Amino acid sequence: MPPFIFASGSAGDMNVKILCLGILHFGDATGYEIRKMTQEGRFGHFIEASYGSIYPALIALEKEGLVVSRKESQAGRPNRKVYSINEAGRATFVAALYNKPRDDVFKSEFLLVMLCAELVSQPYITKLIDDRLNHLDNHIAQMRDVSEDCGHACSQFVLGFGLAIYEAERKYLAEHRQNLETIAKPAALSLEDGAELGNAAE
């Protein structure tokens, strides 16, 4: 199938099972390792996978004959179950790549606060922006470290894409933060009072 023709399936046919196949395409893994990669690792940016969805997906994939598993012994610990993708699973994964992806979803509690900056104090807005910049700096540094050690061209492209987004966000925040800091109330609430209100709302 030519790469510019989408498969007949509906847009966004990607799901947790397809994500598991994609992870196993890059190497064998246990259910715990797969779950960790979808929550904290490089595969956490593609498809929403809840904490409890990985093991049911792996069980279903094995029943469907798309992955196989083996038990490996560990000294002083229970055997671990390691999953591998087979040819049928790899073919299923490749076919899923031809389904047109859904539009990206972006939601941000941070931006909701920025939208209502005139309702909160300037010190609070300043602190949120400072924290956001520190968070971005950490992400950018980590991704640059990974990119330098990565020899896989496709992974380098994805890392570069992510870096471009983070760096653009950081640049915009640094250049335009004063627009909101001047709109926010000088001393509407102390940070401590604001935190108490936030906790009460929860």
Image (cartoon, rainbow, N blue to C red):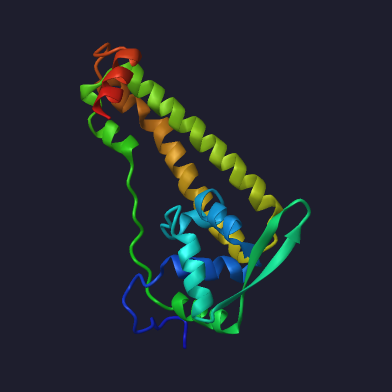
Please tell me how many numbered marks the rendered image carries. 0
Residue under the image location 46 percent in, 48 percent down:
165
Residue under the image location 36 percent in, 58 percent down:
104
- 89 up-or-down from 128: above or below: below
Q: Nearer the viewer, residue 94 or 134?
A: 94
Residue 79 is left or right of residue 87, and the answer is right
Q: Residue 61 in the image: state x and y as whole percent.
A: 50, 74
Snapshot quadrant of residue 49:
bottom left
- 112 up-or-down from 36: above or below: above
Q: Residue 136 in the image: state x and y as whole percent.
A: 50, 37
Q: Nearer the viewer, residue 25 or 99?
A: 25
Q: Nearer the viewer, residue 187 or 180?
A: 187
- 200 up-or-down from 105: above or below: above
Q: Nearer the viewer, residue 124 or 164?
A: 124
Q: Residue 125 in the image: state x and y as whole percent.
A: 34, 23
Snapshot quadrant of residue 26:
bottom right
On the rendered image, what quadrant is the C terminus found in? top left
Q: Quick one: which residue is furthest to the bottom in this view?
A: 1
Residue under the image location 61 percent in, 43 percent down:
142
